[in-house]
Image (cartoon, rainbow, N blue to C red):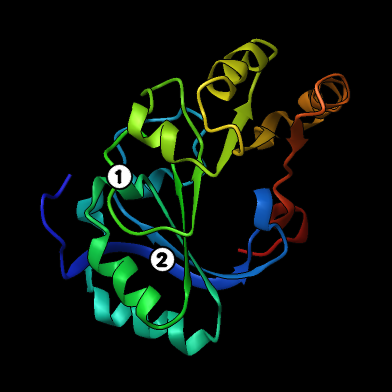
């Protein structure tokens, strides 16, 4: 991770759409997808993001200008693994424009930036740091097989008591996992089902 705020970030893509998952599903949001990830999820649907060197370094001022021009009230920083980069400057500039800052992270790297909403999505391939678990507003665990429910509970026991708990089927396994998740949520109502609605809608 960078030790100081940086003026340019490896930008894979950026776009204005609706948030498809979790607490803010359906909210208009500007997505900033940064390059670079060392977590290595085998089922990742954005593997092109893993190598940061493949993506152009774009000035933070330029990124923020695009967000502001969209008219959005929410910017979602994602990846890749966005916390591989120092995001202090990016979030400070977004907040100065009155834009909410949301991040989607595996939690495997130290926290930087100032956040209105932290979605922690831990992965088995590289465990989240304790500081990231403590900072989570939303825990989103991906359910790929039956053993993932017990794994999700391990993190539910660690996050803050007011953290929202979501179970989300891995897209390619959704037909098999959804019925199991539904039954699990009915038995354990502290959990909430999260669906990737943007994929159903065929939007970015």
Which residue is at the front of the view, 77 or 96?
A: 96
According to the image, label 1 marks what residue?
111
For image coordinates 11% across by 56% down, the residue present is 4
Find residue 116 and report its horizontal and vertical position in percent: 48, 59
According to the image, label 2 marks what residue?
13
Find residue 44 and report its horizontal and vertical position in percent: 49, 37
For image coordinates 52% across by 29% down, the residue present is 159
Q: Quadrant of residue 108?
A: top left
Q: Is residue 28 above or below residue 109?
A: below
Find numbered disc 1 in the image and state the secondary structure of the residue it sits on. loop
Q: Quadrant of the C terminus?
A: bottom right
Find residue 60 and report its horizontal and vertical position in percent: 25, 74
| Alpha carbon separation for disc pair 1 and 2 | 22 Å
Q: In this view, does 200 lie above or below 17?
A: above
For image coordinates 61% across by 38% down, the residue present is 162
Which residue is at the front of the view, 40 or 149?
A: 149
Find numbered disc 2 in the image and state the secondary structure of the residue it sits on. strand
For image coordinates 59% across by 24% down, the residue present is 156
Kindly report which numbered mark, 1 or 2, lies closer to the viewer in this rendering: 1
Q: Can residue 20 be seen in this view?
A: no
10 Å neighbourhood of mark 1: few (<14), some, or many (≥20)?
A: many
Q: Quadrant of residue 127?
A: top left
Q: Is residue 172 above or below residue 111?
A: above
């Amino acid at each position: 991770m960078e030790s100081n705020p940086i003026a340019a970030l490896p930008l894979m893509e950026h776009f204005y759409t609706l948030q498809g998952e979790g607490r803010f599903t359906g909210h208009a949001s500007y997505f900033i997808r940064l390059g670079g990830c060392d977590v290595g999820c085998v089922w990742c649907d954005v593997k092109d993001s893993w190598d940061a060197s493949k993506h152009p370094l774009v000035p933070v001022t330029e990124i923020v200008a695009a967000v502001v021009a969209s008219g959005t009230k929410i910017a979602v920083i994602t990846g890749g693994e966005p916390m591989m980069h120092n995001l202090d400057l990016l979030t400070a500039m977004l907040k100065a424009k009155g834009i909410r800052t949301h991040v989607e992270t595996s939690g495997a790297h130290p926290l930087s930036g100032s956040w209105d909403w932290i979605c922690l999505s831990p992965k088995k391939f590289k465990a989240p740091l304790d500081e990231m678990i403590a900072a989570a507003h939303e825990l989103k665990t991906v359910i790929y097989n039956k053993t993932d429910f017990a794994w999700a509970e391990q993190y539910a026991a660690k996050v803050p008591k007011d953290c929202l708990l979501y179970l989300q089927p891995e897209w390619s396994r959704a037909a098999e996992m959804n019925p199991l998740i539904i039954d699990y949520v009915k038995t354990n109502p502290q959990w909430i089902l999260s669906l990737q609605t943007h994929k159903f809608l065929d939007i970015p």
